[in-house]
Image: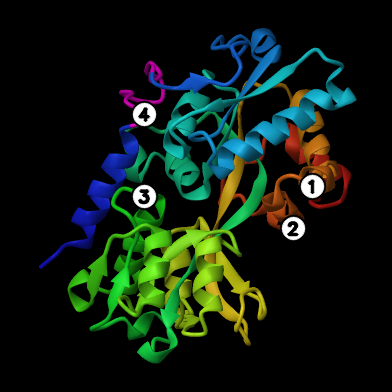
Amino acid sequence: MKSIKRYLTAALAASMLVATVSGCGGSAPASSTAVDATSSTSTTPAKMEEFISLGTSSSGGTFNTLGVAISQLWNDSSSFNKKTQFSAEITGGSSENCLRLNIGEIQMAFSSAASAYEASNGVGQFEGKKCDNIYAVGNLYPAIMQMPVLTSSGIKNMDDLAGKKINVGQAGSGSEAQTLSLLEVYGISLDSFTPQQLSHSNASDALIDEKLDGYINSGSLGQSHQMKALSSGKVSLASFGPSEKIEKLIATYPYYYKYTIPAGSYPNQDSDVETVATGTLLMVNGDISEELVYQATKSLVEGVEELAKTQQIASEIKLPSLLECSGIPLHPGAERYYKEIGAIK
């Protein structure tokens, strides 16, 4: 029998290739390339705050493009009096970002809530590598579990996958890792259906051509591959219920939370769809001063409208979801700002 744990272990191992360190106190990988040559690796607070490197992802990814825009927003802000230079740095993504952030090699970073939770608690792919010097600024936008399916397949929720051909995501991808862990909690064996490992775009095309019954993915609403699939008239969105299994998933992995995809989010979507989401966190090294993080949080929240002019995903940055940080403690500077505006007491 195929083992979900074996699949998941392989996926997580692949993602960790980007961060070959022996632990959170070890040396950082040499493969990352900085966008701005002024980035610093010093861990002394004064030097850390002269040049702030924001760890993102590969070039062109959502983390990277949003990171460049946020860095520019901060550089243009009068709040920092030009004493601090922010730059977006190309990295291997969430896992690498948590490891390097913890040792102060980068000072701020994006991370999936799943990776941040595992890093902060020293579990999963971070077992033996606990990162205890990383803090949250906020949850920027949700990564939503979604499942477009052929309407003719009869799939309404996760209990209907048996005997179907379902795409679980590319090998080593974040979507695959999340899908496999979710299936395990739901008690769904890979032997009960025919799993495929296509990219989201290829899965969408295969679904429209009726070569798949459905595909599971994690991401923001309105992704082009899903818009294309739902526009075909052959496809609908399945729920991630039943509700008791959603509750079990959240109890097992606290970085998930309930999410409702509103009716009309996609073409031909006439009703709400119940699912789960994880956060995309903006993280900061614990040695950064309260004042700098306060100003960065304030500038970000108050600059969302400006950011959204070029970064559509920035329109998702809003309260109260900013505070959905999956148990990762807020940095005192961020907490101070949220208390000031009455978001928390």
Residue 293 place in picture, x, y as percent: 74, 29
| Alpha carbon distance from label 4 to label 1 | 34 Å
Numbered tag placed on residue 320 in the rendering: 2
The numbered mark, 4 or 3, whose residue comes first in the sequence reads: 4
Query: Which residue is denoted by mark 3 in the rendering?
Result: 173
Q: Secondary structure at mark 1?
A: loop
Crowding around mark 2 (Cα neighbors within 10 Å: few <14, some 14 to 19, many 20+) is few
Q: How many marks?
A: 4
| Alpha carbon distance from label 2 to label 4 | 32 Å
Q: Secondary structure at mark 2?
A: loop
Q: Residue at x 37, y 66 (%)?
A: 203
Identify the magenta region. 18-30
| Alpha carbon distance from label 2 to label 1 | 22 Å
Is 292 inside the magenta-drawn segment? no
Q: Quadrant of the N terminus?
A: bottom left
Numbered tag placed on residue 309 in the rendering: 1
In the rendered image, the vertical position of residue 121 relative to residue 197, given as above or below: above
| Alpha carbon distance from label 2 to label 3 | 29 Å
Query: Decide: marks 4, 1 in contact (CB < 8 A)?
Result: no
Looking at the rendered image, the disc whose residue lies closer to the viewer, 4 or 1, is: 1
Crowding around mark 1 (Cα neighbors within 10 Å: few <14, some 14 to 19, many 20+) is few
Viewer can see residue 152: yes
Drawn side of residue 297 relative to residue 195, left or right:
right
Query: Decide: marks 2, 1 in contact (CB < 8 A)?
Result: no
Query: Decide: marks 4, 3 in contact (CB < 8 A)?
Result: no
